[in-house]
Image (spheres, rainbow, N blue to C red):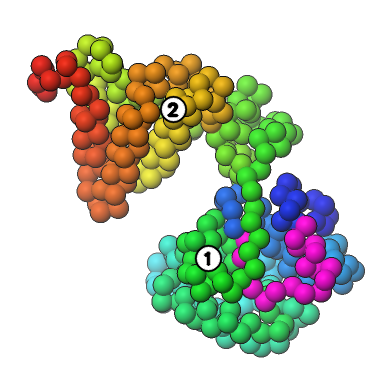
Amino acid sequence: MGFDSFLDNPNAVQSVREMLASGRVPGSLMFTGLDGVGKKTLALMLAKALNCERQSEDFCGECPACRKAEEMLSAAREDLARRRESKDAQRRVEGLVYFDLQLIEPITRYILTEQIRQLRSVANTHPFEFRRRIFVIDDAQAIHWQAVDLLLKILEEPPETTTLILICPNAYELRPTIRSRCRRIAFRPVDDALLSSLLAKDARIPAPQRDLAARVAAGSIARAKAFDVDEFTRHRRPWLDFLDAVTTGSRGDPAPDWKRLFESTKALTEDRIQFEDTLKTGYGLLRDLLHVSVYGPDAKVANIDLLSRLKAWSDKLGVKKIGKLKDGLDQAYRLQTRNVNQQLGLDATVVGLQDTPALRNSSIR
């Protein structure tokens, strides 16, 4: 137990240890970095260390204060789950009660104004059971715009017995006025070798797929542990058909097979609910294609099991057309957010890619 149990990101852990050793923990902190690298875990560890009864620069996990911290976190998670299930907007925020250690997360798409208002009200009171009160605000970028000014007032004059820890992937998703009032601790992606080692201990993923899982996780422990080989390959399959269709007719090949092209874009856009996840898979493949185009077969790619196909696709497309494909995915995303048919953006993209003599002498049927 303690900070020694934290996986990777030694610089972030060292920063936390140094603050505790100096006895000068800022009133507001910001933990930034990729999702799933342990930002929230380390924030909660710090909260325990600030109140542990047995250690001053770490936490034991066994003393009454450490056990009480776990009870508070469990209660907060249960309360959040219950509120998210409520279909009544008013009841979602009724009766908010914040403990000395409080985890604050989005109830809807946002962290609501009432959540921040309650934080502001409680932050200025003396802790009930702990030496120090800690608010851990996860997904801080999701704070509703109407609540940002309320949070800013607390950050401007943080109470002596309260620490706020804001957690977000990218600090620049928050206002400059918020960033400037927080000490930032940056987390880096977890090394692939460590991810593979964790997956080997888990033994849930077969050995041949562990490297794939580690690469696709892109430095995120949470993604690596949640990786489902069958689901991943199922979601990826339409993109493979799409890339096969797009590269037919490139660089002197016969005229494009328009029926196949448009069927592939239709397959990618049929599930509107999952379309954002579909786009993430596509962006990952395009990143791999670009790396193979630039660095050749030695490129570090996420879809390591497709290296030979990635090489064939990149040879036919080239860097310029890969860039056009990326622009097409951007357009499909914009159309989706405006509730317009996403297939339109992809269809326009594949037509624009087929700029060959065969295309100019053919017609679309």
Name the quadrant of the C terminus: top left
* Residue at the limit of the structure toward the right, as seen here: 54
Mark 2 in CB contact with mark 1 (< 8 angstroms):
no
- Secondary-structure class at tag 1: helix
| Residue type of the residue flagged with mark 1 | Ala
x, y percent for residue 337: 30, 53
Name the quadrant of the N terminus: bottom right
Of residues 276 and 19, the one drawn nearer to the viewer in this rendering? 19
> Is residue 97 in the magenta section?
no
Of residues 210 and 67, the one drawn nearer to the viewer in this rendering? 210
- Secondary-structure class at tag 2: helix
Q: Residue at x 75, y 62 (%)?
A: 16
x, y percent for residue 237: 40, 26
Q: Which residues are magenta?
A: 14-31
In this rendering, which labeled residue sits more in front, label 2 or label 1? Answer: 2
> Is residue 21 in the magenta section?
yes
- Which residue is under mark 2? 289
Residue 40 in sight here = no
Q: Residue at x 38, y 40 (%)?
A: 279
Above or below 26: residue 281: above
Label annotation for residue 251: none
| Crowd tier of the residue under label 2, counting other residues whose Cα lies within 10 Å: few below 14, some 14–19, many 20 or above | many
